[in-house]
Image (spheres, grey):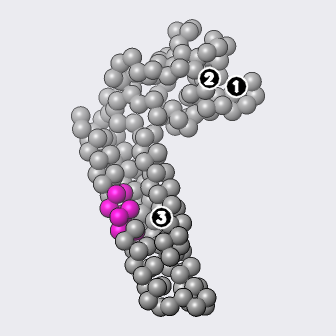
Amino acid sequence: MKERVKVFDEKMTKAYNHLLGEYQTIRAGRANPHVLDKIKVDYYGTPTPLQQVGNISVPEPRMLQIAPWEKSLIRAIEKAIMASDVGITPNNDGSVIRLVFPELTEERRKELVKDVKKKGEEAKVAIRNIRRDANDAFKKLAKEDVSEDEIKDLESEVQKLTDKYIKDIEKAVDEKSKEILTV
């Protein structure tokens, strides 16, 4: 009985964790190395995550510093950052690359909050779709001699999970929005 619900719980957990991962890449005025997580650098013809070709540090609250392990990669790293959606022009002094994060304007903060809410809504839709899939799967169990009461119990378990994750998502949206709007 519990195993049947566990599969859907794992799917909901993945959807929730995906949202949290997305939120880490949204910059809120402070330098956060996670904004570079999705950037791939052309490393001898192979797209390689930026974290694997250099050391990323935060020397100041609004600055990221990337020290490539091979000086020859500076151009490739700069090119990858320019092509990404980070929206910051890299500064290169020949040995390290610096990304200076500008102070966010009120308008930009509001745009970011809208984006945060949109991603939160998408996550809620994903959770609800998982609930729908679970309920469909449980209805099919009726053909396998599972009583209606057991099916109702399974549906109620999944509904409890859905409510829990929706609440967690709303909390994450509120926290990220507050973080962005804090000057």
Give the residue number, with chain letter if any, for mark 3: 9
* Magenta segment: 162-169
Closer mark to the observer between disc 3 and disc 1: 3
Identify the amino acid type marked 3: Asp
- For the residue pair 45 and 157, the one nearer the viewer reads as 157
Counting from the top left corner in percent of width and height, residue 110 is at: 31, 46
Q: CA distance from mark 2 to mark 3?
A: 36 Å
Let me know if residue 130 is in the magenta part.
no
Q: Does the image show residue 30?
A: yes
Question: Is residue 82 or residue 22 the one in the foreground?
Answer: 22
**Given contact means CB atoms under 8 Å apart, are the residues at marks 1 and 2 in contact?**
yes
Tell me the residue that label 1 is attached to. Answer: 43
Q: Secondary structure at mark 1?
A: strand
Secondary structure at badge 3 equals helix
Helix, strand or loop status at disc 2: loop
Circle 2 Cα neighbour tier, 10 Å, few/some/many (<14 / 14–19 / ≥20): many
The amino acid beneath tag 1 is: Tyr
Residue at point 69% right, 28% down? 42
Between disc 2 and disc 3, the foreground one is: 3
Q: Residue at x 39, y 28 (%)?
A: 31
At which x and y percent is residue 40? 62, 33
Rendered location of residue 79, percent (x, y): 61, 25
Q: Which residue is mark 2?
A: 53
Q: Is residue 47 above or below residue 59?
A: below
Q: Earlier in the sequence, mark 1 or mark 2?
A: 1
Q: Is residue 151 left or right of residue 105?
A: right
* Residue drawn at x 44%, y 89% as measured from the top left: 149
- Characterize the local packing of mark 3: few (<14), some (14-19) or many (20 or more) Cα atoms within 10 angstroms: many
> Which amino acid is tagged 2?
Val
State the residue in front, 80 or 146. 146
Mark 3 vs 1: CB contact within 8 A: no
Is residue 120 left or right of 85 when viewed as pictured? left
